[in-house]
Image (cartoon, rainbow, N blue to C red):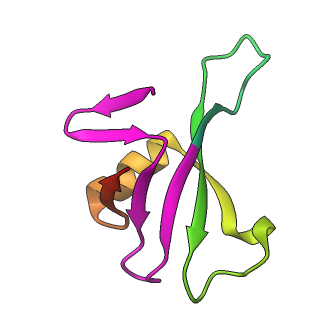
Amino acid sequence: MDIYEYGALLLRVGTVVHDPITGETGLLMQRINLLQDTEYTPVCAWRILWAGRKIQKNLLHREQVYTEEGLKNMVACGALLLLKNI
């Protein structure tokens, strides 16, 4: 299994994140390159499956994509908490 390390931050499939404001919990499902099939520098992102009371029960709304840089910044400022790597 691939592990992506950024200092003390480890991201991999199965990492659980928590949004302390909404109370929602998400699972990192897949790392993707948003600019695949282009000659540009890769822009990596993660598919996140969210669960909780406020999230729509429709799968289209439960799955969202966050850029890897965005995730790192959100964890650094406390907007997302890393709970566990499964």
- Residue 76 position, x and y percent, is 28, 54
25 lies above or below 21:
above
Residue 52 image-quadrant placement: bottom right
Find residue 24 and report its horizontal and vertical position in percent: 49, 77
Please tell me which residue is depicted at 72% across the width and 26% down the height of the picture.
35
Q: Is 47 placed left or right of 4 in the picture?
A: right
Which residue is at the front of the view, 73 or 9? 9
* Residue drawn 32% across the image and 58% down it: 82
Image position, residue 61 (x, y; %): 74, 70
The residue positioned farthest toward the bottom in the image shown: 53
Residue drawn where x is 38% and y is 57% of the image: 74
Q: Is residue 17 above or below residue 6?
A: below
Task: Give the image quarter of residue 33.
Answer: top right
Is the residue 43 above or below the residue 24 in the image?
A: above
Q: Which is more toward the observer, 26 or 36? A: 26
Q: Which region of the structure is painted magenta?
A: 1-29
Q: How many marks?
A: 0
Left or right of residue 43, residue 17 in this image:
left
Q: Residue at x 50, y 64 (%)?
A: 26
Q: Is residue 46 magenta?
A: no
Q: Residue lying furthest top in this view? A: 39
Left or right of 64 in this view: 83: left
Q: Quadrant of the N terminus?
A: top left
Q: Is residue 18 left or right of residue 51?
A: left
Please check the rendered image and state whether residue 8 is part of the magenta-colored stretch, yes or no: yes
